[in-house]
Amino acid sequence: MNNLLPLIVGFPFLVAGVFPFLSKAEDASTQKGLHRIALGASVVLLLLTGLLALSPEAQTATFNLSWLPALGINFSLGTDGISTTLAVLTSLLMVLATGASISTIEKRLPLYYSLLFVLIGSVLGVFLSRDLFLFFLFFELELIPMYLLISTWGGPRREYAAMKFVLYTLFGSVFLLASIIGLAYFSQSYHLPTETLFSFTQLGALAQSGYIPPVFQLLLFVGFFIAFAVKLPIVPLHTWLPDAHVEAPTPISMLLAGILLKMGAYGLLRFGFDWFPVAAQALAPYIGVLAFINIVYTGSIALVQTDMKKLIAYSSVSHMGFILLALVAMNQVGTMAAVFIMVSHGLVSAALFLGVGTLYRQTHSREIALHGGVAQKAPFIFYTFLLMSLASLGLPLLISFAGETLALYGAFISESFRAIPLGFVTLPINIQWITGLSALGIVLGAAYSLWLVKRIFFGAVSDACQKLEDAKLNEVWVLGTLAVLVIVLGFKPQLLTSQFESSTQAIGKRFEQVLVQRDQALLQQLQGYSPQNGVSQNLPMGGQ
Amino acid sequence: MNWFSDFFLNNLWLVPLYPLLAFLSISIGRATQVTCPKTGEKTALLPQIFAPILTMTATGLGLLHAISAIQWLFAQPHEAVQAVERNWTWLSAGNLELKIGTLLDANSVLMLTVVTFVSLLIQYYTHGYMRHDKGYAKFFGYLALFNFSMLGLVLATNLPQMYMFWELVGVSSYLLIGFWFHKPAAAAASLKAFLVNRVGDFGFLIGILFLLFFSLNWWQGYVGLHPEQALLSFQGFESLAGFMSQTLPPWLLGTIAILIFAGPMAKSAQFPLHTWLPDAMEGPTPISALIHAATMVAAGVYLIARVFPIISISPDMAMPFITWTGVITAVVGAIIAVSQTDIKKALAYSTMSQLGFMVAAMGLGAYTAGLFHLFTHAFFKAMLFLCSGSVIHACEDEQDMRQMGGLFKKLPITGLTYLIGTIAISGLFWTSGFWSKDEILAAALHENTAVYAILTATAGLTAFYMFRTFFMTFMGDYRGKAHVHHEDKVMTLPLQILAVPSIFIGLVLSGFVGLPAFGDYITYSLQNAPEHHPHSLLDAMFNQVGNISQLVALVGVALSSAFYYFKVFKTDGVKKVLAPLYNLSQNKFYMDDIYDGIVEGGVLLQSQLNAGFDKYVIDGLVNLVGTVTLLLGKLVTRLNSGRLQTYVATIGFGVVGVWLLYQWMFKG
Amino acid sequence: MMMSAEVAEVAAVAGLTVHHYLGVATILFGLGFAGVVSSRHLIRTLMCVELMLNAVNLVFVAINNHVNPSDLSGQVFAIFILTISAAEAAVGLAIVLALFKNTASVDVEDFSRLKW
Amino acid sequence: MMLEAISDTLIQTSFGQFIYNQNLAFLAPELVISLTLLMTFALSLAKTQVDQAKSWGIALLGSVVALVSIVMHYQLFYTGQVSASQSVMFGMFEADLLSVVSRFILTLGFILILHLSKRFVETRLPSQTGEFYTLLLTAFLGALLLCGANDMIMAFVALETLGISSYILTGYLRNNLKSTEASLKYLVYGGCSSAVLLFGLALIYGLAGGSTSFAVLPQALSQASDLGAWASLAIVMILAGIGFKVSAAPFHTWTPDVYEGSPTPITAFLSVISKLAAFVFAIRLLTPFAGVGNENVALLIGLLAVLSMIVGNVAALKQTNIKRLLGYSTIAHAGYMLVGLAALTQNSLGALLFYLATYVFMNTGAFASAMIGDELLASEEISAYSGLIKAKPWFVFAFSIFLLGLAGIPISAGFFAKFFLFQSVVLSDLGNLGVIIIALLASTVSLYYYLNIIKVMVIGEPSEQVQRLIGEGKDSAWNLSKTLTLATVICLIFTLGLGIFGQSGLLISESAMSDHGATVTQNLR
């Protein structure tokens, strides 16, 4: 099973290599042929990842090939619960995106599909790599295909949006590279074996061991945090997302929202919080505030957007805020919630973007005001879009409810921080306050999604939508699969959580361990302190 | 018979499942188009007629479960009712385990019977009302979805599960209100209903989070106590409340209780969050009857009953708050109902007012009275709405009472049942309304005389506006233009069935007629529970509180008939005299405009500011960095002016500059 | 060997130390550089470049004499510099000639077509 | 075996004896190149153009033989028959591993340049090809000598041979005003900066106690605890000289004009060969100063590095001429390399050497593509390239790979080289992380203009030149020069290959700077 890993990562690149040599004719039959080949290839990829996920060693498969021993870099891939789940999500969304591009992309198909497969190969590489250099290589490799995909097939302001996306992510990866090299410096200065200088196990153990002086731990954490904050995105560094989404063609914005944002979350979880829990706990108050801003601030902006895609883009940022909140909770519930929302948001936002895409394909405008009464013209789009909007606002027994409640429950019962020290003044705001205020996000979520549904689907049929017909066949089966997944995984979330339960539990236990140590240290500090009856009497309101 | 009832008792989890299956089969059946071989035209897989059959069988089975549950309840000694609870894990993460299950105890039996019985009748009625509508099957699908969520809520064993089905009920009411989504008013009403409910759910969620925090982090005792019970299970609420009252300060207890009360405040249309209920009348009448009269709005009161232990531990903060919210809602509802011209809106405001009564009862600690009024109100209010439905159906969808009048002759059964309903709601002649309202007033008298006075006055006002609607629609001569059809047999049958409990249920459950009293099973031992229990039937019928309330109601009826039947006084004369009150009532206390102001001025304005800030400041900063780099680039290329002398000069400046910088940086 | 001893005596008598030579050399160097920067005429620029190179010769010889008079590697270096500067001057003149043939002007200002 | 036979007979002769005891054998590549130089010179006197064309063949043959001799020399090292440091000609030339490896890269680069210039020279100056190659070989000879020069005089002579011949080559298109103007600027600027360099060397000569050899420097400086005023001025002046040759800011003003004006093969030559040789010279000269005065020299070089990174990248943003843009990009890359030089540790210099190797291939590839673009579209403006993917997709793919390589985007050698360089710099001292972050931010800015070209080619509407190309359709096939395409393909293979299979390349460059590799690195960390 171990050598399945390089096959999964290598296969997309192989396909990408083949596509440019296929015929460039623009007539219908070759187009259909190309679409079919691409769909076939992505289905094969899905089978491979599915095979990996269902195999007994889904959580422990590893593959190692020494590549540049002179610098301690080896081509090592591996899986644990989280990586397999995200890999399966990636290949699933790839199949759906290829399905969606059948009706949206017409010109220059060979170039389009080769870039798409390079993109998917690099994302799979990111999720499955167990060597920090390899991770960084794949992290940067997906930039150029994404740039070309957005700027060749995108909307009117595509070049600006694509360039902004690339430069923003590259700005983030500057700090990622700085932290990677910093970590390598410490690994070298502690004379750890050099031929596995960049392997996760070695660097992870070093980071978690606490040998690195706390100041540098903090700096390294901040380096990783900024890099993945751009990708997640977190508020001050998020302005690339609305532009990139609005200008990207539908299948690309499906992938962008579906899996590219998850690279940020995955990185934050694995390199940020998991490797530097002490530093993460120290900065937890500020990240908590960022999470709140991410949820409520972008939620309110989504409310007043006039462009459909921009509204959904801002709502994705708001959902990513819940992931951040779950991570800040630093307990088992929070970690599971974070990974769960990664998957649930992936499916829901992909469906929402395809829904908007089908409308944009026919009305050629994303202005909400121009649309009206679409429900009477296109019932299938209406019912799937309604289902997905309800899912995105967190309706129970649909997929994202479990994620959001776990995030809120986990964050509220967490003890990660009791006050926000701001240099001279310490605000008595603890994580419970932050969670309570972030719960406003679900009200805003309901407001903007249902208001969008009302303005587009209900009421009289607007003139732009007179000639609107229902979704095409390929869009029907794509939206259908997503709807089934959203309902089934909503009814029985354990189907999903059983995949990554063990790894999130392990990470969660490590977080809780850090919090317990912090409390013990605090207790020793107040020597005179003697706990009365074993019940830790820290009132949520008062607290330290 | 008992293996039959055992089957129904043990797998109560089937009750919500039936409507869910009905909903799924209807939606899938209608969605899949299949081309029939002979004619070749595409029809839906499931013919239209199957939709009502599926939904009604599902509700019928639910009713059978309810009957066997009643049998099980009556078989038990009412002092020690053994609740039956079964749980299945829905989602577990770390020390948090969310469970879904079914809880069978007195309250759930009560709600189960009300929901299944009333919805069965309404579904039969809908067959008549919606037969010509294009979305006929879809409507029954949505009704099945609503039943699933309501029954799930009723049988919930713990608060998180209750919250889940709470939101599902909210969504099904959204779908049903916005059923005719091509009408802009219906679309707006459904959005408003859902958002106001969502605001209530926000408070409710914060309350749950608090309870979760204390029971998981502090209350070390929880885990050992009931391993099989779910987190925050209703069974364990007494011990949780006991623990919390010892450890937490009173203001915190009060805040938690009020936060949880925020949920019912929105769902049961209590004062500040009531504006969605009248707009919800945009939906078809059957759902106004089902959801906005009998079941959903009652879910709020049911939740208060479930979390009563938590509320009761803050007697001097949460309980008065709830009482006065109930009272204000009752008064405001009644006043606005007086000036309504649309028959459904009038009934909607009367529901709001009656809900006010129930919530006030709960606030006063009159647990049994509140639930008893909920029980009786479900029947006669559903009947009233169905009557209004049959009137509207007959007058070709005319809802304005000023265009009706004299319909008694054309629609005798509807007229009669409407009269019975009006008598019941006004609490006259010992109908069911009298018994339940009488207990609330008795509790109010015992607890707080001011509340008693206001509630009695409101009871009188209720009688006034209810008879006003009766006289305007059924008495006098027909003012409308439309040709009035005959009443449809399918629609009048449920009316007659509902008339029976509206009259006798109060008497039957007063405990003097062989059957056990309502209060025997549905009680909650509160230290300061009102001790007065009528000893005999006569004493119950003719006690002091009952007589006063009947008297006040009669005065109301008299005044109303004076104005609207005998037309002794001109209504506009009174309007001028009570002008301020009348304007207030006409404009629904300006609540809608206040909310529009809050939403437009507050939320949307702030969002516009945020969007502007995001676009110009953060994005502006990013673009600024871009332009600054380009400017720097221009500046640097300035150096390459093409003139050889400047090039060579840079060597000199370069050397001197670097050397000076070196001296300054490393030596200075 | 003899030669340098006498030279050293004469220098000592006249009070000339290596710093004087370096001073003169730097002044020469500065003049050369100023000449290159300021002159408009190409030939004068080339001559100033030669001047700078000669200034460096002076520095070499002075230092060689001051630091290690017995070993003449400094002066050898100076001779190399002389040859190289001669080669450079030749090439420079050829280029100026080519420019003159094309644009009939030797003014530096005319040759600023390649810019920004 | 045949070689041993020749060398045995040769040794008997007195001349052979002289060569033997001065182990001149290690100067074999230089000797071969001078031989070919003479032959092409003889050919240049021939009248007929056909003979002139043969000179390209001879130049190529000569450089290939030189390459073989270098490889054999490396074999000697590898098999340990020869001890690391072999000073030749009384210490003038140090035939150590550093010089071998750098000369190997140089020759590879030179062979590519030859391929670039074949068609270019035949079409533009058919009658003077012999003379062109003679000059090119002299410049190359200068570069080779510079790599091993371990003495001031030797270094200066080599530097000037390289310099003066490249002045002439820059102005070789006599009737083209741009070329002559470029050579004028190059000459005057080169003259001044070599004067400044000499002034510095003179001061160092004084400091080193009157000996022109670099070997003596380490002892001379060992006592010096801190750089005196004169010594620091000397270092700055030397840096000015090196900065000119390597086109580092603030001594970069000549680069854009000369790169735009001079013929493209010569620009490639300047940007690759002379830069590499100058860096080896810098390594030999500056490493003794590593320990002096708590790394002041390192900070000085770092200053230059940061300045050139910022100037190079920022100025290139708004360029429209492809060669001028590549000129500014070389300034930026000089900045990245100077960061490696500033760290002055063994593995950072090793990584620098590897970076130079990858840079040779990427830059030559980029210039080759510019030349192909010039042949296809007859214009150096980037706008002319718009929509080229519709006519020549494979050319656009190659050009994009070179540009992405220069930008340091993955799977190209540029990414790996940049990563190794920055990582080695930080591993020497965590304090350098600040400089690295500046370098990375600068390379982020650089992606804008590299990606801009790719965007124009892939997304732009076909320009009129490209439309004409599409009109010609497939029959225009590859009437491009065979050698030019061959050179581009070789560069492409190396740009993609050197990263992924860089292990051997890395080992060689690491060994070059290891203890036994270069005499000069004894006192390095």
Image (cartoon, helix red, strand yellow):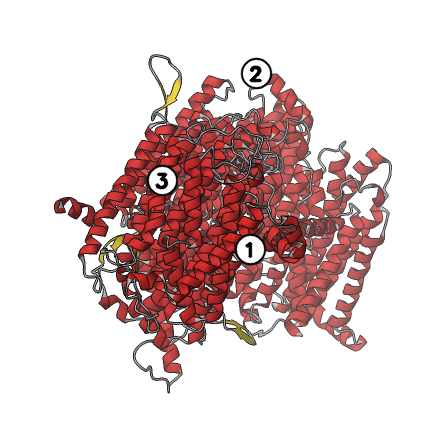
**Do badges 2 and 1 share one subunit?**
no
Residue B553 x/y as whole percent: 47, 56
What amino acid type is highlighted by mark number 1? Ile
What whole-number distance in Å separates the C-alpha atoms at marks 2 and 1? 91 Å
Q: Which residue is mark 2?
A: D475
Chain of the residue under the numbered disc 1 shown in the image: B
Q: Are marks 2 and 3 on the same chain?
A: no
Q: Do tag 3 and tag 1 residues touch (Cβ < 8 Å)?
A: no
Q: What count of labels does the image hold?
A: 3
Specify the amino acid type for callout 2: Asp
- Marked residue chain, label 2: D
Q: Position of residue B532 (x, y in %)?
A: 33, 69
Considering only vertical position in the picture, is A352 above or below B586?
above
Dot 2 and dot 3 residues touching (CB under 8 Å): no
- Of the pair A442 and D69, the residue shown nearer to us: A442
- The answer to whether marks 3 and 1 sit on the same chain is yes
Element assignment for label 2: helix
Q: What number is the disc on residue B335?
A: 1
Nearer to the camera, C77 or A518:
A518
Let me know if residue D421 appears in the view.
no
Mark 3 → mark 1, Cα distance in angstroms = 30 Å
* Residue furthest bottom in the image: A528
Residue at image mark 3 = B496
Mark 2 or 1, which is nearer the eye?
1
The x and y percentages for residue A32 are 44, 21
In the rendered structure, the answer to whether residue D276 lies left or right of residue D515 reads right
